[in-house]
Structure formats: structure tokens, C-alpha cells
Image (cartoon, rainbow, N blue to C red):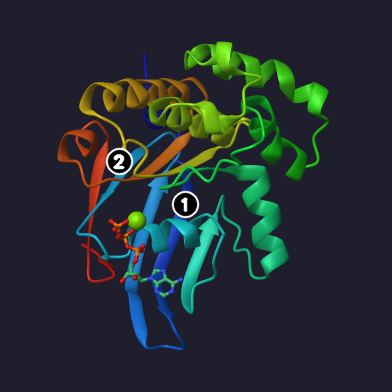
Amino acid sequence: MTSPAASSRSVVIEASNIWKAFDHGRIQVLQGAGLTVHRGETIALCGASGSGKSTLLNIIGGLDAPDEGEVRIHGRIPRTTEDRTRLRRATVGFVFQLHNLIPDLTLVENCLVPALAAGAQPRDRLERIHHLLEATGIRHRADRPVQELSGGERQRAAICRALVNEPSIILADEPTGSLDEASGRQVLDLLFDLVARDAATLVMATHDRAVAERCDRIVVMRDGRTL
Ligand SMILES: Nc1ncnc2c1ncn2[C@@H]1O[C@H](COP(=O)(O)OP(=O)(O)OP(=O)(O)O)[C@@H](O)[C@H]1O
Ligand SMILES: [Mg+2]
């Protein structure tokens, strides 16, 4: 049997010569970074703290714009903020470094946020949400405010939220960074499982070599460049 990655090699993400500075050009972060990712591939983005991993993920996912360079998603270049927002909502699921869950909303309500942003009716997404909560072992927490959840449960909640809209691209920023080794492995198993099931493309920033080695390919960043 051919894997999804092998059966279709269409390019899903093509970021080329990406430059990004903050603080009116005083902090030059990305300096010609580039990344090409095919459908179904899993990529680990490694590199020292401050090398630009989160900044590159944010630009690929359309949360931020590059100063120079191009990002193509499924062959399209989003040029305006509106383009980026539309494309992101339709195509990208984010697992953020700090979860970014809304503490006093319940688990299900948090998962509904990206669905509503994409214009879906809540009732059309509830089945998928419950399926994701079941698959990640947190369904019994569905109606609890996320502030009551443990770190591992929140990390799994963040993965569920990222997958609600069945994104073709999942961008995960240190998805196991705050977890102990065993919980981290468990969360990662779930993430890889769900990604494979949807034949999605995963780009994951991580400091952890063992985590990185589970991906098809490791891309190292240094000083704002991809090596
Ligand atoms: N909005 C911002 N304003 C100013 N500086 C920023 C901003 N975002 C990032 N930076 C700076 O850009 C550099 C790269 O940050 P980034 O978060 O991309 O690194 P990273 O590789 O993800 O690091 P870590 O492994 O610690 O998460 C850092 O020096 C950071 O301080
Ligand atoms: Mg980061």
C-alpha cells in the first residue's frame, strides 16, 4: 500500500526567501527562510530558541505577513490580510505554543471557535468535535471550562480545536513542550494518528530530537534561515 505522502506528491506549502523583522526593522528575525512541504508529509522544524521557528510557522499559517518573500498554500499566494484570514480558516489548524484556549469557555465551546470563524453551523461540527474528544480521551471533560483541565488535557484540547475544520495543513508549535515525557508521547501519538487519518500535512516546531525524529523530515533553523 502506498502512503498518502507517496501517492500524492503535490506541493501544499511553498515558502521561499522569507524575511521578517520586528520593532521597525531593529530585530531581524527571518533572513531568507524557505520551506517546501508535500501533501501528507510531516516536518519537524528544529533550532535554538529564538531562531525563528514560531515566526515562520505564523507566516506560513497567515497569522503574519512576510516583509519579503512568498508563501504559496495549495498554489495560491495570499497577498492581503483578508486573503490570509480566509485561507487560514479554510485550510490551516494551529496548535499554539501556549495553547491559546479561552479559559472560561468549556472544552466544546473552545473547539467551536474555529468552526464559527469559518462560518460553519455549530450543529454541523458537534459530531466531529465529540469524535475528536473521544479519540484524544477527553470527552468526559467536554462541558467543563478549560481552566479546570490539566496541562496534558489542555494540550489535547488544543489539538482537537486545531483539527475541527478538517484542515489540510496542521501547524503545531511545541505541541508537547509543557508535558512530561509519557504524556508528551501520548499527545504526539494522537496528533500523528489524526494527521494520518485525514492525510493532512504537518509542520511541527520542536526542541526535542526524539519528537523530531518521528517526522518524515527534519528542517533545522539557524539565525532565521532554514538549513
Ligand atoms: N512580535 C515580536 N516583536 C518583537 N520581537 C519578536 C516578536 N516575535 C518574535 N520576536 C523575536 O524574534 C526572534 C525569534 O522568535 P521566535 O518566537 O520565532 O523563535 P523560536 O525559534 O520560536 O523560539 P522558541 O524555541 O523559544 O519558541 C526572537 O528573538 C524573538 O524575541
Ligand atoms: Mg517558538
Q: Is residue 148 above or below residue 114?
A: above
Secondary element type, mark 1: strand
* Image quadrant in which you'd find residue 4: top left
* Image quadrant in which you'd find residue 62: bottom right
Three-letter code for the amino acid on which mark 1 is drawn: Ile
Distance between the alpha carbons at the discs numbered 1 and 2: 24 Å
Numbered tag placed on residue 65 in the rendering: none
**Could you tell me which quadrant the N terminus lies in?**
top left
Direction from residue 58 to residue 217 in the image, left or right = left
Residue drawn where x is 49% and y is 62% of the image: 59
Work out whether residue 201 or residue 190 is closer to the camera in this orientation and state it.
Answer: 190
Direction from residue 135 to residue 89 in the image, left or right = right
Q: Position of residue 96 (x, y in %)?
A: 46, 46
Q: Nearer the viewer, mark 1 or mark 2?
A: 2
Three-letter code for the amino acid on which mark 2 is drawn: Gly
Q: Position of residue 55 (x, y in %)?
A: 41, 63
In the picture of the structure, the residue carrying the numbered disc 2 is: 177
Secondary element type, mark 2: loop
In the picture of the structure, the residue carrying the numbered disc 1 is: 13
Q: Position of residue 115 (x, y in %)?
A: 72, 36
Direction from residue 106 to residue 45 in the image, left or right = left
- The crowd level at tag 1 (other Cα within 10 Å; few <14, some 14-19, many 20+) is many
Q: Position of residue 182 (x, y in %)?
A: 24, 21
Residue drawn where x is 56% and y is 31% of the image: 146
Work out whether residue 32 or residue 207 is closer to the camera in this orientation and state it.
Answer: 207
